[in-house]
Image (cartoon, rainbow, N blue to C red):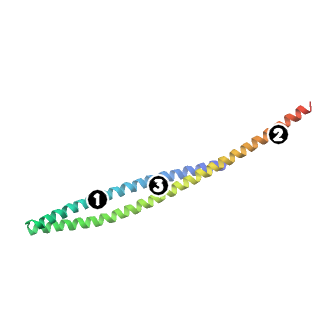
Amino acid sequence: MAESMAFHKILHVRENEKSIALREYNQSLDLFEQVATELYQLLKKKENAEESYDMSLQNATSIEKIKEQALYIEMLNEEISSLQEQVQRARTEMEWKQKKLTDAHVEVKKFQKLIDHRKQKEEVERKKMENTLMDEISVTQFLSHKNR
């Protein structure tokens, strides 16, 4: 019985670790989504800027305006490159946190199974003792009726 209590305490610790891992995973997922959304919006901005640049090249537009648009597109490219690195880091962290969560989940399941097996074993032992006790009582009753 003491072993079962120890396993319950360990299970409680593992469940806490799992909930912490879940919280960290959700935070990393939120961060990934946020950075990926920023990247998407920046890519859309670049797409629009390139369309505007192409239109400027087809129409009569001043050289200064074209240079300004090209510079803006170059700046967007640098921001996109930086954001792509951030997205990759966020993805890597999210995947690591997901693995940590999976490992914590497996640990919780192991202890739950161990506790279930212990309970089954204790139940079998209890039934065995109960049957032995019933047999002893039956023998005692039989002998007391026989001796009368």
Q: Position of residue 92 (x, y in %)?
A: 40, 63
Disc 2/disc 3 C-alpha distance (Å)? 53 Å
Count neighbours of disc 3 (C-alpha within 10 A) and say few if under 14, some if 14 to 19, many if 20 or more.
Answer: many
Answer above or below: position of 67 versus 140: below
Disc 1/disc 2 C-alpha distance (Å)? 79 Å
Tell whether label 3 touches label 2 (CB within 8 Å): no
Q: Is residue 1 visible?
A: no
Q: Which residue is mark 3?
A: 21
Q: Quadrant of residue 107?
A: bottom right
Count neighbours of disc 2 (C-alpha within 10 A) and say few if under 14, some if 14 to 19, many if 20 or more.
Answer: few
The C terminus: image quadrant: top right
In-front residue for pair 99/59: 59
Left or right: residue 63 compared with residue 86? left
Answer above or below: position of 33 versus 63: above
Left or right: residue 73 compared with residue 61? right
Q: Amino acid at mark 2?
A: Glu
- Say the numbered circle drawn on residue 136: 2
Q: Amino acid at mark 1?
A: Tyr
Closer to the chain start, of discs 2 and 3, is 3
Q: Amino acid at mark 3?
A: Ala
Name the secondary structure under disc 1.
Answer: helix
- Say the numbered circle drawn on residue 129: none
Give me the residue at 34% from left, 63% from top.
Answer: 86
Q: Nearer the viewer, mark 1 or mark 3?
A: 1
Q: Position of residue 44 (x, y in %)?
A: 24, 59
Left or right: residue 113 compared with residue 39? right
Closer to the chain start, of discs 1 and 2, is 1
Q: Which residue is mark 1?
A: 40
Q: Position of residue 93 (x, y in %)?
A: 41, 61
Tell whether label 2 touches label 1 (CB within 8 Å): no
